[in-house]
Image: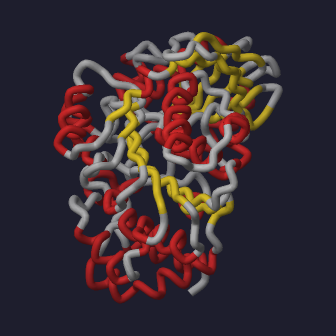
Amino acid sequence: MTYSETLDYLFSQLPMFSRLGAAAVKEGLTNTIALCDALGDPQKKFKSIHIAGTNGKGSTSHMVASILQHAGYKTGLYTSPHLKDFRERIKINGEVCPEQFVIDFTKKIMPLIEKLQPSFFEITVAMAFDYFAQNNVDVAVIEVGLGGRLDSTNIITPELSVITNIGLDHIQLLGDTLTKIAYEKAGIIKKGIPVIIGEALPETRPVFEEKATLENAPIIFAGEKRYVTGWNYINHHLEINVADKQTDERRKYRLDLPGVYQTKNIITVLEVAHYLQQATWSITDKSIEQGIAHAKKTTGLHGRWEVIQQSPVIVLDVAHNADGLKLVAEQLELTTYNKLHIVIGMVKDKDVAASLSLLPKYATYYFTKAKLPRALPETELALLAEGSGLTGQPFDTVSTALNAAKQHAHKDDLILVCGSVFVVGEV
């Protein structure tokens, strides 16, 4: 099989959450355990750090991986979904896995695929673990796909578990309250394994504490260790000043991820790095600073307030739920431009109305949809947006929507593309 034929097989033969939504999710770890058992349990052959959360887990995973790379560790990174190339999900030291590996792995486990009928995600998790084991990584940063407790990645025993935050997303699968969602995320807390909580709310903190107590797992709340004293956002660059709550020592960090929401993620990332330092990992303060400063470049991260063009400025952001879009709206208030154009597409299983209500009413909107079954039709999105006081036109493809925005924008305007990982991926 060619690489293209292999991807066609994986995408067409296997249920895929990003395409189908909840119908593609296979609850439980049975299939992943069976796949990895057949592969010789590759997940037991490398150290790992497990990262869950509603928002920020992607940025956090990439910054932690970048720090480890700058510290000299051969670092695997598993994330999802991908924006453009499937292999973005599986990287070592920022390099995607080779096409030939994907082909060979798929051929090798085809009989098992026919027997187990696993989901797309279960296959990719097993593929990542096998790749990391074959290449003898020192450590792999593993981002949870969905939830935590029943997520396919949850067969690892990591050095450290991390939960960035809890918000209302995937409520049809994880529950319709913050407490229920926190319970699912807390499922990655393992017996005796320390867990770092990025942001805790009154509703979620007791859930994490109860699970940590049950598992005899040390629990660290990152917000109790450090706080942001100030930040500067100039020309799409971000500098953050952070103070240590115990010593009042202050440091300035420069980020190549310019979204102001990184002021939340950096507190979690710094606590992860500090924990690893205390656990005798060879990580210097300089490697932390460099890892944070060059996370995008080091790991190949895209779609986090990413400027892809000047005059007019075009920004891509994968924010796709109410919490994420609220942060994007805050970022827009800090950004200088003449007029604002927003190209937006969303998927059916989000709280679309709540998300749209957070966006600025003064922008011109270009409603569209990505090429996948879960995508909300652009005409329905336009109708829902009208109810939130947003005005614009529907476009049946992402490219026609973006082209229309470009035609209407002047050189001092800003075009923002958001609402869906898949819309950003197409751009």
In the displayed structure, 108 sits above or below 236; it is below
From where the camera sits, is residue 156 visible? yes
Quadrant where the N terminus sits is bottom right
Res 415 quadrant in image: top right
In the displayed structure, 23 sits above or below 103; it is above
Residue 4 placement (x, y as % from top left): 59, 76
Q: Is residue 350 left or right of residue 338?
A: left
Pick the front one: 117 or 165: 165
Q: Is residue 243 left or right of residue 214?
A: right
Pick the front one: 59 or 49: 49
In the displayed structure, 134 sits above or below 60; it is below
Number of marks in the image? 0
Residue drawn at 64 percent across, 16 percent down: 250
From where the camera sits, is residue 396 visible? no
Residue 67 placement (x, y as % from top left): 64, 44
Residue 56 placement (x, y as % from top left): 48, 35
